[in-house]
Image (cartoon, rainbow, N blue to C red):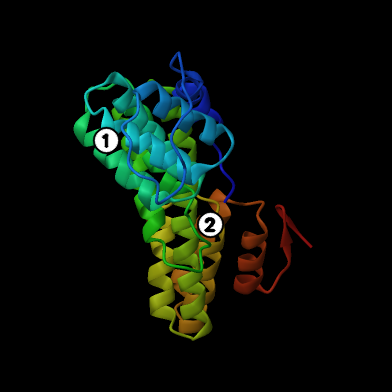
Amino acid sequence: MAKMLSVSRGCGVLALTAVTLGACGWFGSKDENATYVEQPVDVLYNRALDDLGAQDYKHAAKEFEEVDRQHPYSVWATKAEIMAAFTYYESNKYDDAIIALDRFIQLHPGHKDIPYAYYLKAVCYYEQISDVGRDQLITQKALDALSDVAKRFPDTPYARDARLKVELAIDHLAGKEMDIGRYYQKKEQYIGAINRYRTVIERFQTTTHVPEALHRLVECYLALGVKSEAKEAAAVLGFNFPGSDWYADSYYLMTGEDYRFGENK
């Protein structure tokens, strides 16, 4: 899934990365085996920014963490913590980013960048949403985290973007239920399929999957010989989605007649 950080970069991260400390003296080494040398905070922080700008995420993350390790009580240590998390995010190391963000949230609950920390954590989950054919635990985590952002910080740009992403996460969860339902239906395990389709209709009413779920109910009920239930599902489909192809298909199953967009043909 492609990164979608227009909101986050407009809400603080770009400003943070643009902040540099004066009098940056460049020394030290990127050699993994280099002898440890304590360095001024301006050197470490600015070097990390330069590496981040050059997309050298591995060294940028280490150098941001080194700011916090060598100068834990400086104002730049706190900034470096959130920047290290952002660097991990940029390099798609989502687990490391989430660990760093959880630590930041725990240590600095009142910090001005706390809304962003919650938002970036939610985006880390969101960008790992897989196709509906796979387990959707990560989708549920994304949904929970995004909903938390919208609830905690309702008047921020982060909340507005989170609410948009919530809709996609919900659609993915509904898509997973549909995928399992189709599998059961194909195996002629109609009760299992019906339960999945009803979950979509009852829990994910605003998603694009509802018309198909109603039509699949019609198919399953007819396969079981329960025509009254099939008729009810078709009626709900026709009332709510009268112009859909799914209703046309259900109408044909129920009547044997072709129905398109409100016209018998």
Q: Quadrant of the C terminus?
A: bottom right
Pinpoint residue 192: horizontal percent, then vertical percent: 39, 77
| Up/down of 65 relative to 109, above or below | below
Which residue ends up furthest to the bottom in the rendered image?
187
**Residue 200: image x %, image y %?**
43, 59
Kind of element beneath mark 1: helix
Q: Amino acid at mark 1?
A: Arg
Label 1 belongs to which residue? 69
How far is disc 1 from disc 2 in space, using C-alphas?
50 Å
Q: Nearer the viewer, mark 1 or mark 2?
A: 1
Q: Amino acid at mark 2?
A: His
For residue 183, side relative to residue 44 (left or right)? right
Q: For mark 2, does the 10 Å Cα neighbourhood hold few (<14), some (14 to 19), or many (20 or more) residues?
A: some
The residue indicated by pointer 2 is: 209
Name the residue located 47 percent from the left edge and 43 percent from the top edge. 30
Q: Nearer the viewer, residue 140 or 24?
A: 24
Number of on-image labels: 2
Residue at 36% x, 54% y: name it. 140
155 to 83, vertically: above or below: above
Residue 118 makes an appearance in the image: no
Who is closer to the viewer here, 12 or 139?
Answer: 12
Residue 191 at x, y percent in the picture: 39, 78
Q: Quadrant of residue 138?
A: bottom left
